Amino acid sequence: MKVLVIGGGGREHAVCMALAKSPKVDKIWCAPGNGGIAAAAECVDIKATDIDGVVAFSKQNNPDLVVVTPDDPLALGMVDALEEAGFRAFGPHKNAAVIEGSKSFAKELMAKYHIPTAEYAVFENSDEAIAYIKKMGAPIVVKADGLALGKGVTVAMTEDEAIEAVRDAIDGGRFGGAGARVVIEEFLTGPEVSVLAFVDGKNLSTMPSAQDHKRAFDEDRGPNTGGMGAFSPSRFYTEDIAAQCMETIFQPTVAAMAQEGRPFQGVLYFGLMLTPRGPKVIEYNARFGDPETQAVLCRLDSDLFEIMNAVIDGKLDEMDIRWKDDAACCVVMASGGYPTAYEKGKEITGLDDVKESIVVHAGTAVKDGKIVTSGGRVLGVTATAPTLDEAIRKAYADVDKIHFDKAHFRHDIGIKKG
């Protein structure tokens, strides 16, 4: 079978490696791919958002499955276009991907169907938003309504910080159209947990829990990023909490989307906070998370290709999806300056010295036969072990073997307790 994977980051590399393990898969393309993905798949020079280009390539090469992983092409309707052209595509349709593409839609869905989440208000006028902030006080959370590369959220500890975030988004156009509307939420406290689930429109199967580290620097300092690392499982996500989430969040969300005429098929990401008043939804993503995918998919002990086809066929309830007991830790190595300005083209050395971990490429390219940096997040070094502490130790031991100019990474992935 032939598979086309859309995207070019660490998540896509992890998906390609998982698909390559299937005995049914003998050919993988990745569009556009990157320097590391080229070792696991044939890279195709098509942008992830180029729907016409992806459909044209599919008509020429007839993949048996197209896996659409990034948020932008899902929100633009790539799955719809591929299906209309006669191809099997994994991922939600455009009308279901809105659960990530519009935070106001997601909040209104949760309010309508009584799914626990933070209290909120939606604004398109900065003066009205600022008046609300002054009324509610800080700390408070400001979110760009649309897709903003994981950087549209400001956890403001002061009113001034929240007001600046509103003005940047609505008046300053920092996130383009994605920030023309903002969602302002109450500040919640508690450990954060990410739970991804395969969903076939009515059935869901959750993956092992994970925890992401969004802040750029140790001890959760600095600006938000797309993610500086992740580990699995969460230290706080017990069986009792999992059962509570299934009853109050996971199943109600899938049922709500179906009730709204937007049945969700693909991977649904639940960003949760375990508050003193119980688990609440912070955000939904309409696809595999990044870097949570790197820490979760390496624990999969079933055939990802078969799972994806079961999702498309609405037969997820017939699948026995198995996971390894080992824990996993993924440490992201980023370019110096990320998530703001950073340089590209830095040669990466030491990759061949890594023996115990999986090195997932996120922002790399091949230049003159050498692997060089080409993005903000460059590599994800992922190790597995019987215990989380051992996985953390192994991952950092291998991080120390890899070098490129101005490499930056956090030193506390998996270590923080809250």
Image (cartoon, rainbow, N blue to C red):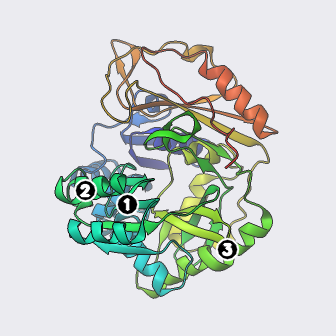
Q: How crowded is mark 2: few (under 14 residues within 10 Å), some or many (20 or more)?
A: many
Does residue 27 appear in the picture of this structure?
no
Reading the image, the residue beneath label 2 is 169
- The residues tagged by marks 3 and 1 sit, at their Cα atoms, a distance apart of 27 Å
Which residue is labeled 1 in the image? 142
**Picture quarter containing residue 380?**
top right
- Tell me the residue at 59%/70% (across/down): 280
Mark 2 and mark 1 in contact (Cβ < 8 Å)? yes
Q: Position of residue 150 (x, y in %)?
A: 40, 50
Q: Can residue 11 be seen in this view?
A: yes
Q: Tag 3, which secondary structure?
A: helix
Mark 2 vs 3, N-terminal side: 2
Discs 3, 1 touching: Cβ within 8 Å: no
Q: In this view, does 302 lie above or below 339?
A: below
Type of amino acid at the residue the image marks with label 2: Ala
* Mark number, residue 246: 3
